Image (cartoon, rainbow, N blue to C red):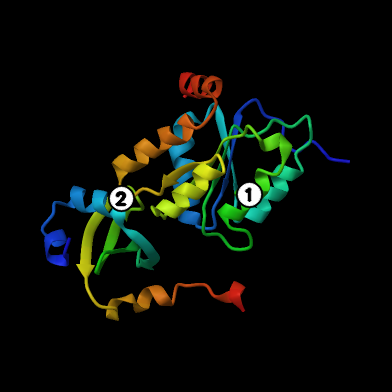
Amino acid sequence: MTMTKYTTSKHIVVYADDDPDDVELVQEAFEQFASNVEVITFSDGSRALSYLRNLAEADPLPCLIILDINMPVLNGKETLLRLRQLDKYDNVPVVLFTTSSMPVDRQFATHNNAGFVTKPLGFEQMEMITHSFIDHCSEETQKKIRRMG
Amino acid sequence: MTLCEFSLLPEEEKTALLYEQGVYIGKRKRGGTTVLLYQLEGFYAEVYYRQYRRVVDRIRCFAGTERLDPYLTEIDVEHLV
């Protein structure tokens, strides 16, 4: 039997990245929406996938899943492929958030119905990226997040 | 773009170019400073941060592989063993 794992009225963003500095960066980026968004982090794709697989019917699905590409155990690309095999995540937006800017990685994301965002190098890019993450959520979710941010 | 041409660009343009065309190589910590290493065509550029991925302190570029050693020690090969 699957247990209910999470009860919150907030929108859930799942983020998997093995780099603690980048985890902190993304958590900070979402702080402006903290009243409405909860970021749940994992240090590799396998842990994130395990969490997502074990969500009960009653648990809210995340509004966005962010995956680093280069992670130990299960990288972001493999995690994305496995997620796309799960029916309940058909419509959940996924973004590959990576140090890569290589066309081959971008094509992989597009081919698997995921967004692609290169990790920022400076402040202005970071501001854009926060909004870019939210742009990947459904229209209804975007409105709710931005209204209450 | 040569190393010399790159080094003459304003910092914002360097950052934008690295973001769009740079290949990320690695990361290291130097005291309280985080440094990211990128490769761009035939040279390397190190981005020194005052605040990680937000406030750039300086960008240092170089050719050759001698200065790559600090990054090699940061590579975790445990999962390959």
- How many residues crowd mark 1 within 10 Å: few (<14), some (14–19), many (20+)? few
Q: Residue at x 40, y 39 (%)?
A: A129
Query: Residue A74 versus residue A21: which sits nearer the camera?
Result: A74
Query: Residue B4 versus residue B12: which sits nearer the camera?
Result: B4
Q: Amino acid at mark 1?
A: Leu
The location of residue B52, given as percent across then percent down, is 36, 53
Look at the picture and state if A83 lies above or below B63: above
Q: Which residue is mark 2?
A: B20
The location of residue A80, given as percent across then percent down, is 60, 48
Q: Quadrant of residue A71?
A: bottom right
Image-based side of B20 in relation to A131, left or right: left
Image-based side of B27 in relation to A75, left or right: left
Q: Quadrant of residue A138?
A: top right
The location of residue A64, given as percent across then percent down, is 57, 36
Query: Residue A107 versus residue A22: which sits nearer the camera?
Result: A107
Q: Which residue is mark 1?
A: A81
Image-based side of B39 in relation to A8, left or right: left
**Residue sitting farthest toward the right:** A1
- Location of the N terminus of chain A by quadrant is top right
Q: Are marks 2 and 1 in contact (CB under 8 Å)?
A: no
Look at the picture and state if A131 lies above or below A42: above
Q: Residue at x 55, y 19 (%)?
A: A140
The location of residue A89, given as percent across then percent down, is 67, 37
Q: Quadrant of residue B70?
A: bottom left
